[in-house]
Image: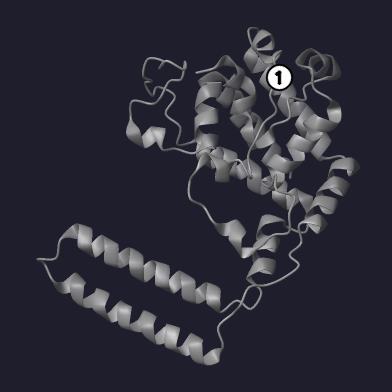
Amino acid sequence: MKIKWMVVSGLFLLTGYRMADDIIAKLGLQTTVAQQYILSNIAGDFSNEPVSDQGETDDGSAYTQMKEFRFPYTKQLPAIIQGDKVSAARELCAYIKTYCASAEFIEMYQKKREAVKPVSEPWRPDAEQLKAQQESVDELGKQLAELRKNKQMPASALDMMEKSYKDAKKQLEDSRDPTPNKTLWEKKYPAEAKSALKNRLKEYLDIAATVDFGAQLTPPDKYGRKKFINPTYEKQTLKWKSIYRAGKDVNAAVTAFIQNWLKEL
């Protein structure tokens, strides 16, 4: 694991490295850059393009994940985190909390929200097509009910059928929405910046609660990269892995800070 991922990665949802001006200088970051990362990570969007139905695509790739989660690189970070990482994490949290309560942050969030407002909507099925789609879903549901009664049906086949039925219902539900892009925009960008912030803070706590800080890693490969021995962990998201890399102590401090912060929001 590269040391540069440590403290800041543990604060992935609040990324910005912005502890105090002297620390920012040591890290070699400009305040505007740091604050842009804070805003984009809280909004969960680095594309700065109008929201569209294509934005819902989630293939699990690092490329896709980095559309909503990134952190700036700085050569000075390894030297900074050789010291008291937990205290640094608390300072970082305190700064971000102050910035997110500022009029500047709220204004920037609203500007970003308006900038990504959808400008079009995709084709939607008409009433007749929706009726046919509903009938198809109903038929699929009947078939699934019959398969559930068959004790000889392999569990894997039943699982596949369950998934197909669930996906078909979701597709039908989405098809009934005349303005899916607007719906997605309102979900990703709540009208109030505070709501977006609360969503991201809660997401951190939810993900952090699943992280196994005792997970074992393989020896570094020829590129110096390590992987999780447990294949399930290796498939985890960049956010999950970032919290793991930050370490248990840093996460404990950040979790406590966020829990108290949420009580004030």
Question: Percent position (x, y) of residue 25?
Answer: 83, 15
Query: In the current view of this chain or complex, which residue is farthest to the front?
Result: 222
Question: Percent position (x, y) of residue 118?
Answer: 73, 65
Q: Residue at x 31, y 78 (%)?
A: 140
Mark 1, residues whose alpha carbon is within 10 Å: few (<14), some, or many (≥20)? few
| The image quarter in which residue 146 lies | bottom left
Callout 1 amino acid: Thr
The colouring scheme, among rainbow, by chain, secondary structure or one colour, is one colour
User: Is 203 or 72 nearer to us in this picture?
Assistant: 72
| Residue designated by label 1 | 74
Left or right for 103, reference 218: right
Left or right for 59, reference 14: left
In terms of secondary structure, where does tag 1 sit? loop
Seen in the picture, residue 146 relative to 112 is either above or below; the reply is below
Query: In the current view of this chain or complex, which residue is farthest to the bottom?
Result: 128
Question: Percent position (x, y) of residue 106?
Answer: 85, 47
Seen in the picture, residue 167 relative to 94 is either above or below; the reply is below
Left or right for 24, reference 256: right
Q: Please say whether residue 167 is visible from this viewpoint.
A: yes
